[in-house]
Image (spheres, helix red, strand yellow):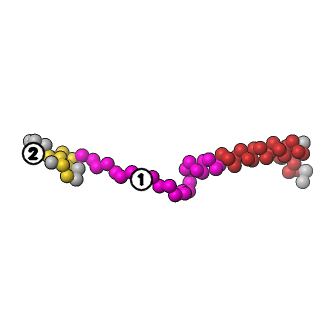
Amino acid sequence: MTSRGYTNEEGGLMNNFAVEPKIYVDEKQQFGFNQYAEKLNGRLAMIGFISAIALEIATGHGVIGFLTNL
């Protein structure tokens, strides 16, 4: 006989088994370190790196050199 995680054996002994928690997937946006935030951070870093290279090609100076000449 099984009910609520308890099982009675043939000898009348009662065994207590852990009940598995219900698992669900939450699809809403979250704050902090999550997969979406890491992807966004990586994409923004790539855009910044390409922009720095384009600035150096266009002006002949690096980012720091360009900012000191303003």
N-terminal-most mark, 2 or 1: 2
Magenta stretch: give its range.
Answer: 17-41
Q: Are marks 2 and 1 in contact (CB under 8 Å)?
A: no
- Residue at the image point whose x is 54% and y is 56% from the top: 30
Q: Amino acid at mark 1?
A: Tyr
The quadrant of the rendering that contains the C terminus is bottom right
The numbered disc on residue 5 is none
Q: Amino acid at mark 2?
A: Gly
Instruction: Tell me which secondary structure the magenta stretch mostly adopts.
Output: loop
Give the quarter of the image for residue 56.
top right
Number of marks drawn: 2
**Would residue 40 appear left or right of 12 to someone viewing this image?**
right
Residue 61 visible within the image: no
Instruction: Check disc 1: other Cα within 10 Å, few if <14, some if 14-19, many if 20+.
Output: few
Spatial CA span between label 2 and label 1? 36 Å
Whole-percent x, y for residue 27 in the image: 50, 55
Residue wearing tag 2: 12
Whole-percent x, y for residue 59 in the image: 90, 45
